[in-house]
Image (spheres, rainbow, N blue to C red):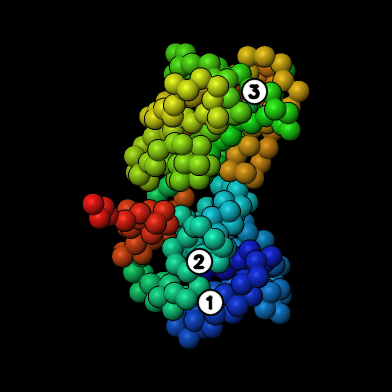
Amino acid sequence: MIGLIAHSEKSDARGAVRAMVAALKEAGIEYALEKYTAALIGRKSSRDERALARESELLVVLGGDGTILRVVHKLAADIRPIFGVNIGSLGFLTCVGPAEIPRAVESLLNKDYILSPRNLLRAELTHATGRTSRLHGLNDVVISRGERSQLVKIEVRIDGAELTHYNADGLIIATPTGSTAYSISAGGPVLMPDSGAFVVTPICPHVLTNRSTVVSDRSVIEAQLLRPEKQVFVTVDGQSTLAMRVGDILRIVKSDRSLPLVTLPERSFPEVLRQKLKWSGSNV
């Protein structure tokens, strides 16, 4: 069975859900709706994201990258393959646009798609009290200051060895999937999905030689604050936020979870990059 989840607040969501439901019906594919998605088209459902995932072999998520991130966080350990239909703006995780719903359903019917395994990260914030908070993320972990203009001073260690001290607005630790999100906006490199790495990118560093560092995803990345700050936060995928203080230790490792992201055979990652970033060949 296919599970359908839409970003119910997007203006195009209702039309996209109706088109998807009609195409699935015509193809004879069994489907079920998440409760807020069902309400968009006047249906009723009691299923939340996790309940829907437990009944489904694959989830079609209609929205943008942020919608997929939200769904991944709500699924927790009940992750299923996700087929993204973009009804947002820039979408690196989505597979097709709303005009391509017939192609999407055809690929589902014939199982003519590729599963691209996307590694997740695990963030563990061990507080000075000894209590540990754990979160899993698909894109990134961001250490950021609050509303103050003061820089944050962060020590970073890789497998126990000191890398550097950053004086910056913050720090991003991203997976290959997250390398095309906040990290690229902060000047980080694009990593291929199967590169087996993290990228550590400072946000507006005070020292101009502080650049992005690519680190094996077999490594343990540790970060600590080096001076008291009134407001410093650790945010995972823009979904979950924890307060961080001096004496706390943030550890980031590769998670034992991964997301099977659905892609079409004709949509290789280099092709997606070229289209989304509007790259073209030189005409010199």
Q: Tell me the distance, in whole angstroms, between the alpha carbons under discs 1 and 3.
A: 47 Å
User: What mark, if any, has residue 151 been given in the picture?
Assistant: 3
Question: Which residue occupies the foreground of this view, 237 or 78?
Answer: 237
Residue at position x 64%, y 23% in the image: 151
Marks 2 and 3, the one that precedes in the sequence: 2
Residue type, mark 3 in image: Leu
Counting other residues with Cα less than 10 Å from the Cα at mark 2, is it few (<14), some (14-19), or many (20 or more)? Answer: many
> For the view shown, which residue lies furthest in the front direction?
284
Residue 117 spot, x, y in % from top left: 40, 49
Q: Tell me the distance, in whole angstroms, between the alpha carbons under discs 2 and 1.
A: 10 Å
User: What mark, if any, has residue 184 been given in the picture?
Assistant: none
Q: In this view, does 88 lie to the left or right of 97?
A: right
Residue at position x 62%, y 71% in the image: 13
Task: Name the residue carrying label 2.
Answer: 85
Q: Quadrant of residue 217?
A: top left
Q: Quadrant of residue 135?
A: top right
Q: Is residue 42 above or below residue 163?
A: below
Marks 2 and 1, the one that precedes in the sequence: 1
Residue type, mark 1 in image: Met
Mark nearer the viewer, 1 or 3: 3
Q: Tell me the distance, in whole angstroms, between the alpha carbons under discs 2 and 3.
A: 39 Å
Residue at position x 40%, y 38% in the image: 189
Mark nearer the viewer, 2 or 3: 3
Q: Is residue 238 above or below residue 56?
A: above
Marks 1 and 3, the one that precedes in the sequence: 1
Residue 197 spot, x, y in % from top left: 39, 34
Task: Name the residue carrying label 1.
Answer: 20
- Report helix, strand or loop for mark 1: helix
- Report helix, strand or loop for mark 3: loop
Residue at position x 54%, y 25% in the image: 205
Q: Is residue 84 above or below residue 241?
A: below
Residue type, mark 2 in image: Val
